[in-house]
Image: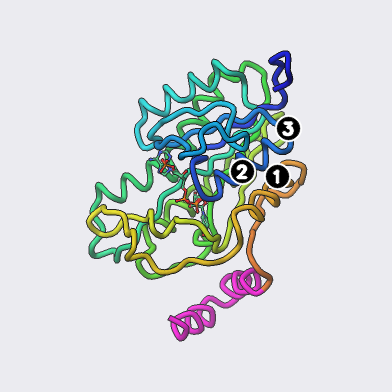
Amino acid sequence: MDIFGNMDQVVWITGGSQGIGRALVQEYRRKGWTVIATSRQKSGPQENDEDLAHFWIQADLSQPEARQEALQRVLAIGWPDLVIFNAGVGHWAPVSATKAADADYIFQVNYWAAVDLTYQLQQLQAGRPLHIVAVTSIAAHFGQRKLATYSATKAALRLWALSLNEEWQGSANRIQVVSPGVVTTDIMRNTLDRDGNRLGDRAKSHHGWSPEKVAQKLYAVPQSAKFEHIFASFSVRLALILHDLCPRLFYTLTRRRS
Ligand SMILES: NC(=O)c1ccc[n+]([C@@H]2O[C@H](COP(=O)([O-])OP(=O)(O)OC[C@H]3O[C@@H](n4cnc5c(N)ncnc54)[C@H](OP(=O)(O)O)[C@@H]3O)[C@@H](O)[C@H]2O)c1
């Protein structure tokens, strides 16, 4: 926003309170965008920090009514030139111990929020273009123990986006997908266990790319013509190719490592 209150390009980032989302808020602010962020918690102790979003909307995106309300508040600020569906929550439990209510919650946050809000945005766009970046995960590409629900939400989101991308060919609307590998955030600590509780200190250590590196790379995504962007090392990307070409070998090797 300039000194006269005129809006620059507007980005709406979900899950902006921490981790990748917070780094995205900072990156887009640095690049001069007007940033609207949503999350359940307020953005932490440095609320007046100039790195934080211009507009903060508290909303639990697992709740359809809260999604509607958040969208109305976003639109009262302005039509977003870019929407980044980044909010997400992990789930760590074997299938045999996964309660339907917990799986439903994970799907609401990771899948339905993006699907529902995209539908609402399309109803209201009135000729304005819609550009969406959905954050999925490399977990959408292969099976892992205790991650069935989380991976299924990300795979569903990815395939939904692939399908929408086909529907939107030749229109002014665009959707792209970003699939990170391991990023150093509190995602594992925030992950829910078989009883629906945060793993907290029970979480395994989780180290990979920095959220800032992910945010910088994601900033370049809308300028690219490519649909899916995998943010992971060369060896991880090679492993994904092996999974597609020879799943048996892929799973034999990953079982040996676990
Ligand atoms: N870190 C990784 O290794 C990794 C790898 C692949 C993909 N990803 C994906 O990247 C995205 C960001 O992950 P992260 O690592 O930054 O995780 P994170 O640090 O745990 O942050 C998750 C964000 O989502 C928000 N969120 C969670 N539940 C919500 C709800 N019910 N309503 C609204 N907002 C909610 C959180 O805000 P509040 O708690 O304040 O609501 C927070 O801002 C997720 O979609 C994740 O699946 C992460």
SS of the residue at dot 3? loop
Residue 108 appears in which quarter of the rendering? Answer: top left
Q: What is the secondary structure assignment of the residue under circle 2?
A: helix
Distance Cα–Cα, label 2 vs label 3: 12 Å
Is there CB contact under 8 Å for labels 1 and 2?
Answer: yes
Return the mark for residue 201: none
Residue 102 percent location from the top left of the image: 28, 50
Residue at horizontal 26 percent and vertical 52 percent from the top: 196
Image quarter where the N terminus lies is top right
Image check: 214 left or right of 117? right
* Residue receiving disc 2: 24
* Magenta extent: 235-258
Judge whether 102 appears above or below 44 on screen.
below
Query: Which residue was labeled with disc 3?
Result: 32
Task: Estimate the x, y position of residue 238 in percent, counting from the top left.
Answer: 65, 73
* Residue type, mark 1 in image: Tyr
Residue at numbered disc 1: 219
Q: Residue furthest toward the top? A: 4
Q: Per the image, is 251 magenta?
A: yes
Mark 2 is on which residue type? Leu
Q: Secondary structure at mark 1?
A: helix
Q: Main secondary structure of the magenta part?
A: helix
Q: Nearer the viewer, mark 1 or mark 3?
A: 3
Q: Nearer the viewer, residue 210 or 225?
A: 210
